[in-house]
Amino acid sequence: MADPGRAAVRAGATTSDRTIADLLVERLRAWRVPRVFGQPGEGVALIVEALRRAGGDPAFVPSRQPEGAGFMAAGHAKYTGGVGICLATQGPGALHLLGGLYDAKLDGKPMVALVGQQTYSALGSAYQEIELPRLFSDVCAQFLRTAAVPEQVPYLLDQAIRTAVSTRSPTCLVVPHDLLNQVVPDGMPHPDGGGVLASAPGLPPARVMPHETDLNAAAQLLAAGQRVAILVGQGGYGAADEIMELADRLDAGVATSLLGKPVLDERLPYHTGVLGQVGTAASAQLMAGCDTLLMVGTNDPWTGYYPVPGQATAVQIDIDGSRLASRYPIDVPLVGDARETLRALLSRVPQRRNRDWRDMIEGAVDRARTECDARAEERTDRLNPRLVLRELSPRLPADASVAVDVGSVTYWYARHLQLPPGTRAHLCGTLASVGSAVPYAIAAKFARPDRPVFVLLGDGAMQSGGLAELITVAQHWPEWPDPRLVVLVLNNSDQAGRGGEPERGPDTAPVTAPGAELDRPAAPGMPPPDAVRGGNIPYAGWARLLGLHGIGVDRPEQIGPAWEEAMAAERPTLIEAVVDPSIPLDAPEQPFADLRGLTAGGLDEAAGTAVQGRARALRNRATNGADLV
């Protein structure tokens, strides 16, 4: 790829008037960065102007607040697999990027923060000044640099992007304001007396595979298992066919982490659903009964729902070796790409039938799905939120993207929304930051403007930035070939997030005719409507005020037609569903939960000696080339 320093300069400009800000934008273009998310500010104003001069390559997407820009960049990385770029000025702008950066760090996504800084002459004046290296030292530990001279900028940007991609983590480049305005030196000479700052954009993907001996050992363990369980995380994206083939070969059951929910077709008869506190009873039963566990690209934190330590031999596949054996004692760890590693295992694992185990799994799945349907049909004081999500399942397009926020909606998404194959769905899985879903959806829509996007969140999350970023949707939707961006707000009048058990006092305003309040604006100088004073925002009315479509529902028979109306609308739509806040967020029962206390401090001798001895024997035989019969 050609050095952008030698590329044609922008229209109407000469080499002598190109600034470092222009050079930075050209370097982003050389990396094929499609867009930059950020909020304009004094420290990065020159970069924003350079992006505008570039004519949309890369495009600049302004957020309503810097926190939204951070989550948009993290969302871009999640929905596209590319690196997310966010932009913020020094001081308060930099502070608000931390949420998105930590989201990317904890979920293992590449992201680069470009942060402005005061001019060198003003440093020390304490005006909007923060020790940026100290602020970002943890979240951007893999790469954090401050440019000091023009010649460094393309090199440091290359390193920031390359490190983010290769380590699947966030990085940061700080560029002082006065450096951005400097004219690009002719030929970009190297600093006097310094070393050579040679760099070029581009990072070809690598093929990561485990050693043959480890693959043989893993295959032996899996083939010897009588009751095999497979736990799939987000690292299993792209390996659905291999996972299904291996599950059929071993008569295994399959559960997923919350982040791994979109990987497999959830209609499979042996797919038990999500594991953990937000998951299903079938997944808990799968883990409680297995004697062999295969973990594929998952770092699921719900370890209380894993097999009791010592119960199962375990194989784990992950591209990141630091995640191996961090959740469960692993007998054979495999560092490698999930799809390639599973293909290698398939060539080594023979057909091993255990219909009793598979029949038990499928029976548990049938019972769990029947129970979910029954709970969705329960009559409640207000709308049953489970029913709202279940009614979306048969109507959700396979090419859709789904963004899910934090709160009770996560439970209903995990259990009651069945994703068709091909749907991309993401949430702030490990950091669990409220208010991330609307920025995610904006990033997903810009990545694929020809496909529909759905946002699922509660009223508290909508107030945490969603109301503001809906303005971004209103600004840009006419540019999208497919205008469908559907925002579902589950309004349970519980902005404090008390886990589905809100206090009901005199200040809790009843909600009727959702969104109607903004159709009757108060006279100038009059206090806001009672609903707003009580904490209830007219969400559907706010959408209509912005020129979007707003729908309010408060009865079961309205839900299906509301989804269909939203999907047929010629503009983005917000559905405000007034739901019952008293629906409990019950965790699935853990079979044999009393046994976990015996092993809480680790693997005790009585529980684990036989299992671990069997694992060592199998591994030794596989390493020595012996086959099991």
Image (tube, helix red, strand yellow):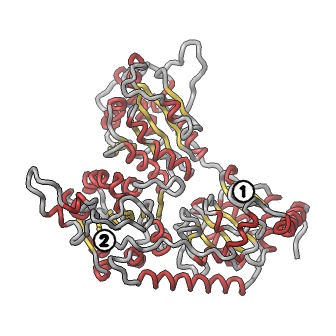
Instruction: Give amino acid for label 1.
Output: Ala
Badge 2 element: strand
At 76% across and 69% down in the image, what residue appears? 312
**Is disc 2 in contact with disc 1, using a CB cutoff of under 8 Å?**
no
Classify 373 as above or below 302: below
At 52% across and 30% down in the image, what residue appears? 133
**Residue to which mark 1 is pinned:** 325
Badge 2, how many Cα within 10 Å: few under 14, some, many 20+?
many
Q: Is residue 320 left or right of residue 310?
A: left
Instruction: Give amino acid for label 2.
Output: Val
Q: Is residue 376 left or right of residue 252?
A: left
Badge 1 element: loop
Residue 586 image position (x, y, % from top left): 51, 73
Residue 265 image position (x, y, % from top left): 54, 74
Badge 1, how many Cα within 10 Å: few under 14, some, many 20+?
some
Classify 358 as above or below 304: below
Q: Is residue 278 left or right of residue 124?
A: right
**Residue to which mark 2 is pinned:** 578
Quadrant in the rendering for residue 480: bottom left
Classify 136 as above or below 353: above
Report if residue 246 is visible in the image.
no
Q: Residue lying farthest top?
A: 193
- Name the N-terminal-most of marks 2 and 1: 1
Quadrant in the rendering for residue 165: top right
At 67% across and 67% down in the image, what residue appears? 306
Report if residue 527 is visible in the image.
yes
The number of callouts visible is: 2
Which mark is drawn over residue 46? none
